[in-house]
Image (cartoon, rainbow, N blue to C red):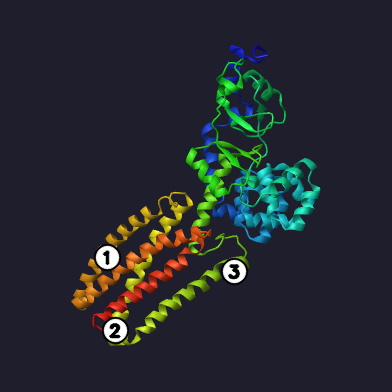
Amino acid sequence: MAEDNRLSEDDVMLADAPVQTESEELAKPDDRIDDERHDEENRLKPEYIRSVRDALEARDNNAVYDIVEPLHPADIADLLELLERDERARLAASITDLMSSDVIAELNDFVREEMMEALEPEAVATIVEQLETDDAVQLIEDLDEDDQQAVLAEVEAEDRVAIESALAYPEETAGRLMNREFVAVPEHLTVGDLIDYLREEGDLANEFYEVFVVDHMHRPVGTCALNWILTTPRAIKLTDVMKRDQTLIPATMDQEELGLMFEKYALISAAVVDESGRLVGQMTVDDVLHIIAEEAGEDALLLSGAGDGDINEPIREAYGSRVRWLIANLGTALVGSAIIAAFGAAIEKLVALAVLMPIVASIGGNAGTQTMAVAVRAIATNQLTRANTWRIVWKELRVALLNGVTIAVLIGIGTAAIFTPQLGVVIALAMVINIIVSGMAGVLVPVIFERLKQDPAVASSVFVTMITDSMGFFAFLGLAVASGLA
């Protein structure tokens, strides 16, 4: 069979020879390259978007189609996100056959949900059947329960079973995200048997980087990379060449831990197993890259209290996710105001205190935010664990002490030159105290939230801000009163 598939030298020469059509011979290569570069440079630029909007406004569906047709599916998705809600519906109606599953899979969550709500269940089911299982699950899970059932009722039985089994796993776990299309073979095969199978099987996964070798219980016992298969003699048994050491992903593993595992071990793909150890799917690096980017962006937004932070997020949801943290910040600000009020008489006696105390609080807040950002990231990447918590705390204490002394010297000299040497000493001491406290709060608050099984990125900033502001005001005003300045 191998000899039947060999190419002769003449075949190779013909395969390598460039083939040109008559129209291609007449066209200048440089002109074609320039045209492609021109299209690429103008893609989704303001002028391009304006032309799409003008065609939509004129109700010229043919013009809209001609403008959009050259775009890559990902660019069509970006175009839909850049348009207003009513324009999206008109664009989708004008380019119906271009609204492929690839376009739907690339859409922003909010825009995709909006588009799905505008379609009939039969149309959504048609799109679902074109998608990979993991993309189909992502689309279905965003729908309401009633809409999910209506769409699944229209999906073919085989696809419906796969989607329903994925939805049975918790959100943001490997079971939800995995691809159920993979290549698995029994361990008794030879390399030749495997090559014949891959050639003859007409329903292989669209993308795979390795073949999973399983035992009679369908549990993975090894993997064979494609380059091994292609370069190994046919008579060799898979058990003699397969890689037995492999990273298995439990179907219940959280996506954040999954991303860290792929990053740590430089994985291209990995088998996903159920509770009994049976192979149920695979994770590939392209899917994990989306997870890593999503988790990183999510942590950054949570630290700022901006909720999902998506520009396509509906106004009501954006308001609800942001206002609650603003209310929490209002409460913590009142704590600082109460401390200031307690020293009202001292401030009236020495107005310079009112001028300088925001500096102490502001610098302390920045110091706390720096440490908190480092700590939250370290927790998220498993660099800060129970095993090294106190070593990291001790390190951050020393960093805070050095920062505090440096800033204290600068602000102390400046204050002494403008006001009095005694006030310069007071603000220098207050600055050292506040930066040290801020540094400790920046690392300890996220650690405490993590120990309490809470996301440290969610509420750490509120409490760190409260501690730094309150301590800054209390240390500065308290030292001023104790020193007899006010």
Label 2 packing within 10 angstroms: few (<14), some (14-19), many (20+): few
Q: Foreground: 273 or 13?
A: 273
Determine the secondary structure under disc 2.
loop
Q: Amino acid at mark 1?
A: Ile
Query: Quarter of the image holding residue 115?
Result: bottom right
Q: CA distance from mark 3 to mark 2?
A: 40 Å
> Which element carries disc 3, helix, strand or loop?
helix
Q: Amino acid at mark 2?
A: Val
The spot of residue 423 in percent (x, y) is 23, 77
Q: Is residue 42 visible?
A: no
Q: Residue at x 57, y 20 (%)?
A: 240
Query: Judging from the image, what secondary structure is the residue with disc 1 in?
Result: helix
Task: Look at mark 3 in the image and give the residue it sits on.
Answer: 320
Image quarter of the N terminus: top right
Q: Which residue is at a point 61% across and 23% down the rendered structure image?
A: 19
- Asked if residue 44 is positioned above or below residue 213 in the image, the reply reads below
Cβ atoms under marks 3 and 2 closer than 8 Å: no
Residue at 74% x, 57% y is 145
- Location of mark 2 (residue): 351
**Tag in front: 1 or 3:** 1
Asked whether the beta carbons under mark 1 and mark 3 sit within 8 Å of each other, the answer is no
- In depth, the one of 282 and 220 nearer the eye is 220
Residue type, mark 3 in image = Gly
Q: At 68% across and 58% down in the image, what residue appears?
A: 114
Q: Nearer the viewer, residue 43 or 476?
A: 476
Q: Position of residue 270 (x, y in %)?
A: 58, 37
Which residue in the protein does label 1 denote?
A: 407
Whether residue 1 can be seen here: yes
Quadrant in the picture for the C terminus: bottom left
Q: Earlier in the sequence, mark 1 or mark 2?
A: 2
